Amino acid sequence: MNFLKNIKIGNRLFLGFGLLIVLTLFLSSISYFFMKNIGTQLDEITENRMVKVDMLRNIQDVLNTNVRTLRDIILLPEDKNKEKRQLKADIVKTTDVASEIYKKLDSSIRMENARELFNQLIDIRKQYSLSVNNAINYAMEDQDALATEVVFGDIAKIQGIYFNKLNELIALQVSLVDTAKQTTKEHITNALLWLLTLSAFSTVLGCLAAWLLTRSVTAPLSIALSSAKRISAGDLSGSIDVNSHDETGLLLEAMKEMQSALTRMVVGVRSSAESVATASMQIAQGNADLSSRTEEQASALEETSSTMTQLGMTVKNNADNARQANVLAQNASTVALQGGNVVNDVVDTMKSINESSRSIADIINVIDSIAFQTNILALNAAVEAARAGEQGRGFAVVAGEVRNLAQRSAEAAKEIKNLITASVERVELGSVLVNKAGETMQQVVMSIRQLSDTVSEISSASAEQSTGVEQVGIAVSQMDQTTQQNAALVEESAAAAQSLKEQADQLVREVSVFKIVNDQRSTPKPVTQILSLARLPASSSASASGTSDWASF
């Protein structure tokens, strides 16, 4: 059992249950092996041997049926040919059934002695079939005497041999069935013996493993339980022996460490309780000094609170002025934006005038071109009139007038073109100036927007500053209230210090219940002397800190 001490409990359980599983699998395998053999034997009996016996008996039935049918054919009168043919067909049908049985037997018989009998049976069947066919032929030809002679002669002789061979083969199959039954019984007996033996062995082995596992777990737990009861009773002087490395060993080791820690804790608590009793007296003295300083701090906080109230009002006025400046900046930004939009409209109008002037110039060019072509046509007309002589004189006068009008139109078009060109140049110059004015106006709008944003940020910052000052004032008021509450708490702390001393004495008496090895005693820890803060100039320090805070603010 000692080898189990260093194995984890989980591994022990795994080994124990694994052993049971292995034994169960082994038993299942043996059972499966025997059951499979028994099943094979039963299959051999039911699916092979008995089937062959039934087939052979069916062949005997077919032989008897055919002989009776052949007899009926012989006994029928000559005018019953139809009935004879029907009976002959019945013989052929039953013979086909026998042929199918022979095919199945031929494919299923494998034993040498059975095969030899089967081959002899095949030879006899051929002779029997030949005699039957002869008898049928005689009967169908109304030669009943010859048919009767064949039936009671050859067929009767061969049928006796035929039945003997069938009975021999049936007897062989029955003997094989008996042998298989006996083998199956032996297998069942062996299987029962094996299963009973292995079950008994598995039960004993499982019980032994369970006892060992239980013993290896419960023994250390009993030690742990007794140690826990001893420690719960306040006895820390006993020892805990650890002789294993499993979970129970770790538990005992942890309990051993817990006992050592409790021993150290009890010794420390005794020392600390005595130190607490000494320190509580010093705390009471310090509380008296703290009470006087708290009163001085409360008066300083009242003055600071009034100053913060005045500062809050000033900051609030600044926030209101910044808010009004923000409104004026937003209005100026709106006006500048409207002016920028008007300038943009003027720029668009100048562009439209410029485009119209260019269109007029193009029209004047067309008029000039028309006047030039008219002058050329009038010149051609005058030439043609001169060639016509007297007959074309009137036409020449008209052509001259047209030419004069064309020249005057061309001169007028040139003057208009010059005027339009000058106008277009002035319009382009105006457009350039208007564009520059628009860009300047946009810069003004952007500057006013930036100014508005800056003023808005100043307004937001002033509002936040006002809120912050109000919160600081509230905080100072709360500090004043807290300081007054602290003064009351200091008095309560003095009473609590006295109560703490009494509880420390009670703790010393309670801890003395624990029994420690050799009754260890510890020296009380030295208590640090609490300096009296009353010696410090509280009022001057408070005023100095207040001045520093206002300067940084």
Image: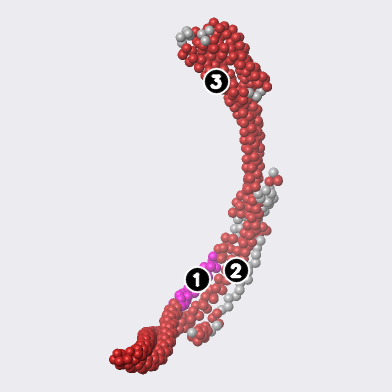
Q: What element carries label 2?
A: helix
Mark 2 vs mark 3: in front: 3
Q: Residue at x 58, y 61 (%)?
A: 509
State the residue in front, 165 or 123. 123
Looking at numbered disc 3 in the image, what kind of residue is underneath it?
Answer: Asp
- Crowding at dot 2, Cα within 10 Å, few <14 / some 14-19 / many 20+, comes out as some
Lower sequence index among marks 3 and 1 = 3
Real-space Cα distance between discs 3 and 1?
A: 125 Å
Q: Mark 2 highlights which residue?
A: 275
* Image quarter of residue 165: top right
Name the quarter where the N terminus is drawn: top right
Q: How crowded is mark 3: few (under 14 residues within 10 Å), some or many (20 or more)?
A: few
User: Mark 3 = which residue?
Assistant: 96
Q: Is residue 487 magenta?
A: yes
Residue, disc 1 = 495
Dots 2 and 3: beta carbons under 8 Å? no
